[in-house]
Image (cartoon, grey):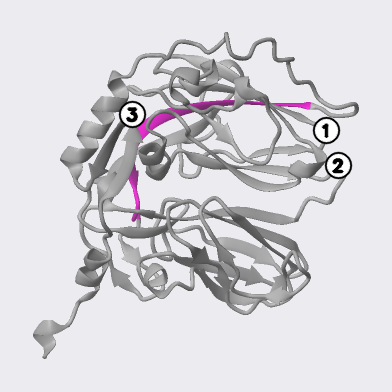
Amino acid sequence: MAKNRLDRRSFLGASAGTALLCTIGGETFRVSNADDLKRADAKAASLSRPRQASQELTGFPQPEPAPGGQVREYWIQARSRWWDILPNKRDDWHDVPIRGKSTYRAFVYQEMTAGFAAPKGPPVIPGPTLKCEVGDLLVVHFRNADRELEQAVTMHPHGVHYNPEYDGAYMGAYTRTGGFVQPGEEFTYRWEARPDSVGVWPYHDHGPNHTLNTMRGLFGAIIVYPKGGKIPDLERVLFLHALTPPVTGLKTARQCINGRAFAGNTPTIQAKVGQDVALHVIGMDDAFHDFHLHGHRWLDAAGTYVDTPTVGPNETITARFTEDNPGRWLYHCHVFSHQDGGMAGWYVVDR
């Protein structure tokens, strides 16, 4: 009987998932292994800049801040790097080691100082959180600093207002300049924060290989606050997503929070009693997840108390509450295979 049981490693391997379908430059790829991934990347790298569709739409006005608003300026670069999904090599919740290779070639965003003079922080998953208020203009200077994957990438935002020049989307023959930023090139996006932009939104690659590159790690968040609104004492953005063999080339699928799997590797959030806490949870793969925080509940947008709301691909939910319950708590996706595959972490509250 024991021979038929799945050990922990076998269970995780069994949940590795199926092939990933993606279309690159008009060609559909079925990516299920490292060789398929190389072919897809080679196709993306072979694409040349599309002819600009200036004959279709021209003369877009340059966006400016609303009266009383500010220009919020960021310098962001995209680059490839080796990323370890399990830096601590163990699951701290169950106190067990996690064996096997856990490092893959990721594609990530990195914040730089003005003029791309120096790194402002490490290249990480997710990329830097961009913050502004209603009325502000986000000016994002973007550079494709990749020297490994050698393909065009972009930054495409949700939630904010922009004209087609700043969409950051590859659209074949209709592609604008910001939708195809090749290695070594730069482009500046200008995004307006209007009253209907209040909230937390994802941004991600939308270049010719956007499916693979977003799943590799090219994503981050934008937070738009109401004008003069209260900023939480503690605020974190948590992306729920899988890193699967078609993308990583590893043998095992990992269910991740911010590019890491299993408590002790995923973000450990430290809070204090009395703090105004906001946890923003975004889905960033093909699955539906939910978010459960032990010992806590909060009001959803409809004014109903919840403790396990669902979040779909590129959707956001926010758990906001005044902290009143000290202790060590688990947070996790309550899809059980996701939870047991690594999508869990610690929330620690001090008095």
Gap between marks 3 and 2, in whole Å?
Answer: 43 Å
Gap between marks 2 and 1, in whole Å?
Answer: 7 Å
For the C terminus, the image quarter is bottom right
79 lies above or below 158: above
Q: Furthest residue to the right?
A: 67
81 lies above or below 182: below
- Callout 2 touching callout 1 (CB < 8 Å): yes
Residue drawn at (62%, 79%) of the image: 295
Sequence-first disc among 1 and 3:
3
Q: Furthest residue to the bottom?
A: 1
* Badge 3: residue crowd in 10 Å (few <14, some 14–19, many ≥20): few
Residue on which the image places disc 2: 227
| Range of residues picked out in magenta | 71-87
Q: Furthest residue to the front?
A: 56
Q: Hey, which quadrant is residue 16 in on the image? A: bottom left
Residue drawn at (74%, 15%) of the image: 61
Could you say where residue 70 lies in the image, as x and y percent from the top left?
81, 27
Type of the residue with mark 1: Gly
Residue on which the image places disc 1: 135
Q: Secondary structure at mark 2?
A: loop
Observer-side mark, 1 or 3, equals 3
Q: Hey, which quadrant is residue 96 in on the image? A: bottom left
Could you say where residue 275 lies in the image, as x and y percent from the top left?
75, 64
Which labelled disc corresponds to residue 26? 3
For the N terminus, the image quarter is bottom left
